[in-house]
Image: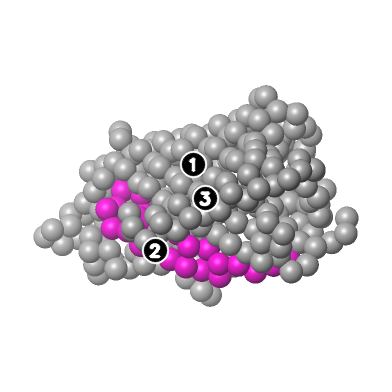
């Protein structure tokens, strides 16, 4: 992992803790229905799960929070609620990943690059221990289509299922929020072909033709912290995937059972609604 990037993560963690310790009161944090801002996110990750090549990217992003009855855009989620209560929720949820530098991967020389992707599909969330879906343990069952973006083109590249357990602790340290995810990843043959497949046209003497199959795609855990300090929003996360025993390990594009990603984000919030 990039040493300087690890330093950045350590600095953010210290900042979050110091800000929490220095807080003088345990007052409830006001959460507006709408908030707008702008920020920058930095991430260090492998080119894809199973690769040993890593990349570090910095991207600007709009900070948008909207807490509506049906549409919710928040610190770590984007979803449209179909049914929601304190115990169970069915929603259309989204996720995204950025892997632009995978075009430089030596194992994929001469192949089409892996484009940035987003995921969209239904997710069922069941409250296990908290007062509502924002506290305590949840069982979550997202199944999403995966779409690759090569602007202006968008193409469907497969389906992912990601059953997991999530623990949320809001206001863990006077305004610092904690989140843990742990679960499994399953993909269909199309998605695995997108990552690990080698067509006859792409096959070489060193890179054999390979047709991927559907099935188990690894286990993971992810830990994240986020905090508001006045008009500033800070977030950091670490994710580890173990790919032992997955389908498609025989692909010539697969190199390692271990995958680590680290991310930092900071945003300035310049407007909030009064409700």
Are the two marked residues, 2 and 3, in contact with CB atoms closer than 8 angstroms? no
Disc 2/disc 3 C-alpha distance (Å): 22 Å
Give the vertical position of 194 relative to 216 (above or below). Answer: below
Q: Position of residue 268 (x, y in %)?
A: 66, 66
Q: Residue 222 — which label?
A: 1
Residue interval drawn in magenta: 36-60
Q: Which is nearer the eye, 49 or 213?
A: 49
Mark 2 or mark 3, earlier in chain: 3
Q: Position of residue 15 (x, y in %)?
A: 56, 53
* Local crowd size for mark 1, using a 10 Å CA cut-off: few (<14), some (14–19), many (≥20): some
Residue under the point 80% across and 43% down:
28
- Is 2 on the left-hand or right-hand side of 181? left
Mark 2 or mark 1, earlier in chain: 2
- Work out which quarter of the rendered image holds the C terminus and state it: bottom right
What SS does tag 1 mark? Answer: strand
Q: Is residue 54 magenta?
A: yes
Give the vertical position of 168 relative to 63 (above or below). Answer: above
- Work out which quarter of the rendered image holds the N terminus and state it: bottom left
Question: Which numbered disc, 2 or 3, marks the residue closer to the eye?
Answer: 3
Residue behind mark 3:
14
Residue under the point 70% across and 47% down:
23
Q: Which is nearer the eye, 273 or 194?
A: 273
* Local crowd size for mark 2, using a 10 Å CA cut-off: few (<14), some (14–19), many (≥20): some
Q: Name the outermost residue toward the top.
A: 129
Question: Which numbered disc, 3 or 1, marks the residue closer to the eye?
Answer: 3
Residue behind mark 2:
56
């Amino acid at each position: 992992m990039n040493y300087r990037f690890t330093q950045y993560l350590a600095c953010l963690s210290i900042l979050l803790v110091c800000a929490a310790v220095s807080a003088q009161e345990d007052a409830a944090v006001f959460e507006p229905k709408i908030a707008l801002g702008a920020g920058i996110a930095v991430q260090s990750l492998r080119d894809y799960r199973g690769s040993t090549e890593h990349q570090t990217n910095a991207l600007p992003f709009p900070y948008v929070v909207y807490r509506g009855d049906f549409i919710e855009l928040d610190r770590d989620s984007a979803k449209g609620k179909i049914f929601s209560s304190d115990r169970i929720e069915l929603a259309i949820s989204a996720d995204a990943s950025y892997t632009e530098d995978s075009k430089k991967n030596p194992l994929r020389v001469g192949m089409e690059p892996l484009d940035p992707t987003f995921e969209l599909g239904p997710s069922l969330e069941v409250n296990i221990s908290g007062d509502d879906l924002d506290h305590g343990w949840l069982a979550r069952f997202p199944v999403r289509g995966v779409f690759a973006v090569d602007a202006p083109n968008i193409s469907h590249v497969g389906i992912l299922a990601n059953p997991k357990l999530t623990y949320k602790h809001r206001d863990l340290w006077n305004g610092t929020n904690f989140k843990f995810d742990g679960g499994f990843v399953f993909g269909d043959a199309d998605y695995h072909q997108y990552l690990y497949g080698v067509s006859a046209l792409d096959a070489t003497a060193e890179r054999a033709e390979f047709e991927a199959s559907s099935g188990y795609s690894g286990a993971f855990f992810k830990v994240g912290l986020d905090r508001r300090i006045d008009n500033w929003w800070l977030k950091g996360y670490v994710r580890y995937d173990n790919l032992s025993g997955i389908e498609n390990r025989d692909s010539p594009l697969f190199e390692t059972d271990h995958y680590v990603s680290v991310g930092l984000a900071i945003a300035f919030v310049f407007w909030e609604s009064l409700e």
